[in-house]
């Protein structure tokens, strides 16, 4: 599910800015962007986020802004001197006469401004602020995802009701299928035999056999059962997205079987085909919505 959360957490000499951005994904994919001084914390942060997230491509952005004292950003004078010396040399080499170095561009060079002290000198107050910010951001992200999930579940249930309505209409039409097969078979045999007499018993046997092979009763029952199971999954607790994906594959398979069995019913078959195609459309729309659920 999609979502965004941002938290600012102050500490003694500055503040931590922690943000989470989530988009749909079949599994859980955590991508971190944070200062090198926080690299030792990645494993702990990853474990904390995995406890609260099951699916999604999640971008984790962490920055530490210091306001003064030890660890405040410092100018890398040696790097700046090297940049200033290299600029006129490069300008002369490539014929850019009169060009002057831009200080703003120089300050954006990686490493030009860096925290004083070694990267591993993180500080307990900073680490604590990062972990607290992560917990708060995760809670905010999940609150938004829960609201989106509730709206998505409501839409899925509405479409599931429409699917059950289509199944009910197909069940009504199915009641006249045997008679339709009998009539169609008689017409075909009459064409082949050119008016010769047809034995009624043999005609009835062939029609019954053909009707049995093309009966969609089991498929319609399974569609109803799967729809009820879908509603149970949405009403239950825990992760439902992956189980919904498997269930919807089964529902789509049943709808395809209905289509393959109703091709020889003339106008009755055309109506059945339209209903089965509409059912497949509802199943596909439910599948698209289910990708937004955990």
Image: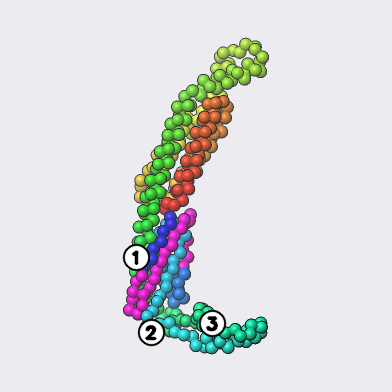
How many C-alpha atoms fall within 10 Å of the one at disc 2: few (<14), some, or many (≥20)?
A: few
On residue 70, which mark appears? 2
Farthest top residue in view: 197
Secondary structure of residue under mark 2: loop
- In primary-sequence order, the first of circles 1 and 3 is 3
**Label 3 sits on residue:** 102
Q: Is residue 145 above or below residue 199?
A: below
Q: Is residue 118 left or right of residue 186?
A: left
Q: Which residue is mark 1?
A: 136
Instruction: Find residue 100 and report its horizontal and vertical position in percent.
Output: 57, 84
Q: Is residue 114 left or right of residue 147?
A: right
Sequence order check: which comes first, mark 2 or mark 1? 2
Query: Which residue appears at 38% of the width and 66% of the height?
Result: 6
Magenta span of residues: 8-32
Judged by depth in the image, the label closer to the viewer, 1 or 3, is 3
Q: Please report whichever mark, 2 or 3, sits nearer to the chain's N-terminal start.
A: 2
Instruction: Please tell me whether residue 149 belongs to the stretch shown in magenta.
Output: no
What type of secondary structure mainly makes up the magenta span?
A: strand
Q: Quadrant of residue 265?
A: top right
Viewer-closest of 285 and 215:
285
Secondary element at tag 3: loop
Residue at horizontal 46%, vertical 81%? Answer: 114
Q: Spatial distance from mark 1 to mark 3, Cα to Cα?
A: 40 Å
Q: CA distance from mark 2 to mark 3?
A: 29 Å
Position of residue 15 measured from the top left corner of the image (x, y, whole percent): 36, 75
Q: Residues within 10 Å of mark 1 (few under 14, many from 20)?
A: some
- Vertical order, 145 against 255 (above or below): below
Image position, residue 290 (x, y; %): 45, 48
């Amino acid at each position: 599910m999609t979502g965004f959360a941002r938290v600012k957490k102050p500490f003694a000499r500055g503040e931590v800015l922690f943000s989470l951005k989530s988009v749909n994904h079949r599994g859980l994919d955590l991508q971190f962007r944070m200062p090198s001084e926080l690299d030792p914390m990645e494993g702990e942060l990853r474990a904390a986020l995995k406890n609260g997230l099951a699916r999604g491509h999640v971008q984790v952005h962490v920055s530490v802004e210091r306001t003064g004292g030890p660890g405040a950003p410092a100018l890398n004078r040696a790097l700046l001197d090297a940049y200033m010396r290299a600029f006129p040399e490069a300008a002369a080499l490539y014929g850019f006469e009169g060009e002057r170095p831009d200080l703003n561009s120089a300050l954006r060079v990686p490493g030009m401004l860096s925290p004083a002290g070694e990267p591993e000198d993180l500080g307990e107050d900073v680490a604590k602020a990062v972990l607290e910010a992560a917990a708060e951001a995760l809670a905010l992200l999940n609150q938004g995802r829960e609201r989106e999930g509730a709206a998505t579940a409501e839409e899925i249930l509405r479409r599931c009701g429409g699917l059950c309505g289509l199944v009910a209409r197909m069940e009504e039409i199915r009641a006249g299928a045997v008679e339709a097969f009998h009539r169609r078979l008689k017409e075909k045999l009459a064409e082949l035999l050119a008016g010769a007499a047809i034995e009624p018993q043999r005609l009835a046997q062939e029609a019954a056999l053909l009707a049995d092979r093309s009966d969609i009763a089991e498929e319609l029952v399974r569609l109803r059962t799967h729809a009820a199971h879908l509603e149970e999954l949405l009403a239950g607790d825990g992760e439902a997205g992956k189980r919904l994906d498997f269930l919807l594959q089964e529902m789509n398979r049943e709808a395809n079987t209905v289509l393959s069995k109703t091709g020889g019913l003339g106008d009755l078959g055309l109506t059945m085909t339209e209903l089965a195609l509409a059912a497949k459309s509802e199943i596909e729309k439910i599948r698209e919505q289910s990708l937004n659920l955990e």
